[in-house]
Amino acid sequence: MAKQTLEFTRTIQAAPEMVFRALTNGTALREWLCDTALFDARPGGNYYAAWNSGYYATGQVLKLTAPSKLTLTWLGRGYPEATEVKIAVAKKKAGAVVTVTQAGVGTGKKWGSAYAEVKDGWEKSLENLQSVLETGEDLRFTLRPMLGVSGLEDVDAATAARLKLPAARGLRLDGTVEGMGARAAGLQKDDVLVGLGRQKVQNYATLLTALQAYRGGDTVEVVYYRDGVKQSAPMTLSRRALPAIPGTAAELAEAMRAVFAGGDATLERVLAGVTEAEADYRTRPGEWNVKETLAHLIANERDSHIYMVDLIASDERVGGFQANSDLRLKAIAQAYGTAAALVEELKRNEAETVAVLAGLPEAFIAEKRTYWRLAYSLLAANTHVDEHAEQITNAVAAARAAGKG
């Protein structure tokens, strides 16, 4: 079949230098194009971009003339041969015109869905590039629907056996959130999600892929297991509540201080009168006790410090962090010993987060795409303590029922 050349153009109200950086920096690429990226920005350098859907592209930088021209080889997953991508950035009044040309895209059986993926992918991605550079807002997050769950866990063999599942696949719900789609549909803690719409859900990556076809407010069928029985129900996907993004470092620091104050008050309430024996009680093997839940909050805050520094340096690491590692949580709980000491350590880490935010460089705040992502990720997590407060309350109630007080 004949090869196709596709061209896409977008006018963006941002300086060409800022646009070009978004095209040639690994951290920046994650903010509008893909989920993981490495980019060696020099002629002859290699790059790699990957999406949670399983798609990836890799190739070599053929030409790079900042801030106006970039030429890459582009070998996407399933391509029988590499294509060529040329990106031109031209200054226009207060902004820039971005033109992307991808040549050598074939059609027919051996190319599969490549043509449709290229067309849809660049159109949506350039729309998002414009959004993150002009406002900071990442449309992949703001338009993405929510299930309304407090936690999801990939099902392993042990969990499959405990929940009487036919296979070790799907996502176990840690809980549901009041007023959101999952609870309204009747889903409960320990239900295992295996389908959304027409897509099978085998793990978190496949869930993200399934959700990409929908927006908040859409109603879809969810398929799940409860007590070993396969069930289904219609669920209206929740709209994502967007926090107001403060315009300055000082305002962001104060906003997070208020979030932490609310979380600290919640912990003080649910931990009132809890004994060390109750805080050590484990409702069942593999379940966190109260101290390990507090350790998880500490680990999450420590990881956020690393995340912030990575973003400021435009050198975000690949692979994420490990705030759920049982080994790490047990070590933290053991090191501090008491529930009160763990709460105090959490407060120290929260104070460090506020201090980092208050000191954010002006140049970083001017990078709207990265500043928005940082502020959004922190402020959108303002229910994290509340989600785990219910877990703590249930663990304490179980300990008292078992006479462990």
Image (spheres, helix red, strand yellow):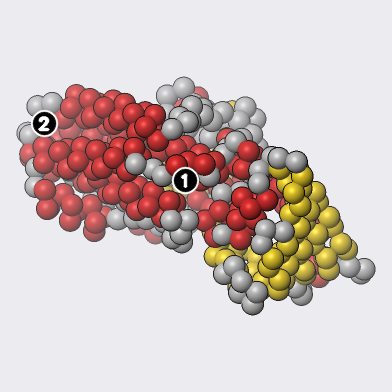
- Label 2: state its secondary structure: loop
Residue at x 52% of width, y 41% of height: 366
Above or below, 79 relative to 354: below
Residue at x 86% of width, y 62% of height: 5
- Label 1: state its secondary structure: helix
Q: Is residue 208 left or right of residue 103?
A: left
Tag 1: Cα neighbours inside 10 Å, few (<14), some, or many (≥20)?
some
- Per the image, the residue denoted by label 2 is 274
Q: Residue furthest front?
A: 93
Q: Residue 78: in sight, yes or no? A: no
Residue in the foreground of this view, choosing between 19 and 118: 19
The C terminus - image quarter: top left
Residue type at the position of mark 2: Val
Q: Residue furthest bottom?
A: 44
Residue in the foreground of this view, choosing between 150 and 394: 150
Tag 2: Cα neighbours inside 10 Å, few (<14), some, or many (≥20)?
some
Label at residue 398: none
| Residue 200 image point, x, y percent | 60, 50
Q: Is residue 386 left or right of residue 14?
A: left
| Residue 317 image point, x, y percent | 44, 60
Q: Residue 45: in sight, yes or no? A: yes
Above or below, 350 relative to 107: above
Residue in the foreground of this view, choosing between 236 and 400: 236
Q: Is residue 189 left or right of residue 286?
A: right
Alpha carbons under labels 2 and 1: distance apart: 43 Å
- Per the image, the residue denoted by label 1 is 364
Residue type at the position of mark 1: Phe
| Residue 333 image point, x, y percent | 16, 49
